[in-house]
């Protein structure tokens, strides 16, 4: 990625003209100075966004790769980030790969920020590249980051482009295999608790579930979004029980949501798997910490983190890695089915 490709034809003088301020005022804003009036700050910030301007120092940084820092951007809230073992595995894999390089990792949990602070920091030249994990359709600020530095996505990007690099697991196949296993065990009324349909992982696992039912000419069961959280899984399970359409099995698109679902079933006096079977997804530590232990689809989250870091390091070294890497899931049979 060249300096010209990053900056295009926009200059600091053009930003100053668009904002109606002096070149020195734009420079102060770009460098984070507080010696700027609120009106000037707003005008310059708007001009930078409208013109898609990237400061010179960001371009120089990308060209020389002198910062030796990489941003891990997670557009989630802190509760989910620290409460979901998926993120711990991803970060461990990324850190393991970076520990064998000269790069350090900067973490940005960007849910409470519409992307402005994160975007400004990344585009300022403070990092050489970024890894983005767990993004939603509403996270449009990621596009501005991808226009400034090389980005590798964890999971298929919400708006996939030919130039994008990403490492994903085969979520469609995972959802298909999970549901097929339930069918092969004799279950015919299968509901599903999904992740958010604003996220590709949620969409793809739901698609796999539907594909498996269609292949066996079975009707679709109740579909409820559990938001990839334990509380969300619990609420989704309550809704399923209250619907009056009692399924004999539920494919739950994450182990964390399955934990919440199991608690609700236990409180309702229903036995797993005797009364209702539960299939999870992830094979995180949650799967073996619940009772009964979860039958689940294992996704190689640690390996995914390592691979993302490797691809980004290759990009920063001027190499040409594959744009798309898909890792396989694996059925792990325990006691919940």
Image (cartoon, helix red, strand yellow):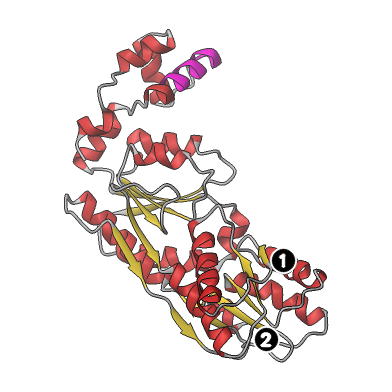
Q: Is residue 206 visible?
A: yes
> Which callout, 1 or 2, points to the residue nearer the camera?
1
Determine the residue positioned at 26% across, 27% down.
Answer: 8
Determine the residue positioned at 25% across, 60% down.
Answer: 101
Q: Pinpoint residue 206: horizontal percent, then vertical percent.
A: 55, 66
Q: Which mark is residue 236?
A: 1
Q: Which image quadrant is residue 33 in? A: top left
The boundaries of the magenta stretch are 36-47
Residue bearing the label numbered 2 = 291
Q: Is residue 98 visible?
A: no
Question: Left or right: where does residue 144 sit relative to residue 203?
Answer: left
Q: Pinpoint residue 294: horizontal percent, then vertical percent.
A: 59, 83
Front residue of 137 and 130: 137
Estimate the spatial distance between the alpha carbons at disc 1 and disc 2, rounded to whole Å.
19 Å
Question: Left or right: where does residue 316 sit relative to residue 55?
Answer: left
Q: Pinpoint residue 170: horizontal percent, then vertical percent.
A: 41, 69
Does the magenta run of residues contain 37? yes
| 74 is higher (above) or lower (below) than 303 | above
| 58 is higher (above) or lower (below) than 111 | above
Determine the residue positioned at 74% across, 77% down.
Answer: 263
Dominant secondary structure of the magenta stretch? helix
Crowding near the residue tagged with mark 1, few <14, some 14–19, many ≥20 C-alpha atoms within 10 Å: many
């Amino acid at each position: 990625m060249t300096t010209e490709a990053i900056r295009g034809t926009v200059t600091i003088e053009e930003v100053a003209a668009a904002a109606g301020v002096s070149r020195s005022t734009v420079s102060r804003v770009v460098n984070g100075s507080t010696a700027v009036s609120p009106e000037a700050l707003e005008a310059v910030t708007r001009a930078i966004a409208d013109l898609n301007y990237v400061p010179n120092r960001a371009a120089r940084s990308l060209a020389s790769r002198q910062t030796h820092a990489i941003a891990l951007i997670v557009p989630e809230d802190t509760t989910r980030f620290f409460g979901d073992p998926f993120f711990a595995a991803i970060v461990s894999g990324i850190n393991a790969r970076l520990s064998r390089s000269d790069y350090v990792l900067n973490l940005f949990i960007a849910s409470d920020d519409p992307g402005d602070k994160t975007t400004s920091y990344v585009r300022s030249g403070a990092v050489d590249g970024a890894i983005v994990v767990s993004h939603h359709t509403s996270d449009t600020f990621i596009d501005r980051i991808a226009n400034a530095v090389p980005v590798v996505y964890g999971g298929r990007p919400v708006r996939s482009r030919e130039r994008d690099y990403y490492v994903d697991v085969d979520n469609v196949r995972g959802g298909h295999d999970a549901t097929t296993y339930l069918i092969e065990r004799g279950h015919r009324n299968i509901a599903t608790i999904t992740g958010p349909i604003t996220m590709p992982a949620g969409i793809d696992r739901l698609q796999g579930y539907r594909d498996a039912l269609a292949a066996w000419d079975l009707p679709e069961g109740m579909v409820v979004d559990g938001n990839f959280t334990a509380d969300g899984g619990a609420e989704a399970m309550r809704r399923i029980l209250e619907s009056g359409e009692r399924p004999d099995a539920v494919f739950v698109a994450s182990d964390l949501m399955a934990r919440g679902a199991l608690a609700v079933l236990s409180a309702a006096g229903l036995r797993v798997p005797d009364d209702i079977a539960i299939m999870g997804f992830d094979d995180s530590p949650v799967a073996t910490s619940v009772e009964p232990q979860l039958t689940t689809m294992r996704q190689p989250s640690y390996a995914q983190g390592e691979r993302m870091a490797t691809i980004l390091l290759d990009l920063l070294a001027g190499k040409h890695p594959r744009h798309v890497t898909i890792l396989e899931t694996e059925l792990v049979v325990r006691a919940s089915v």
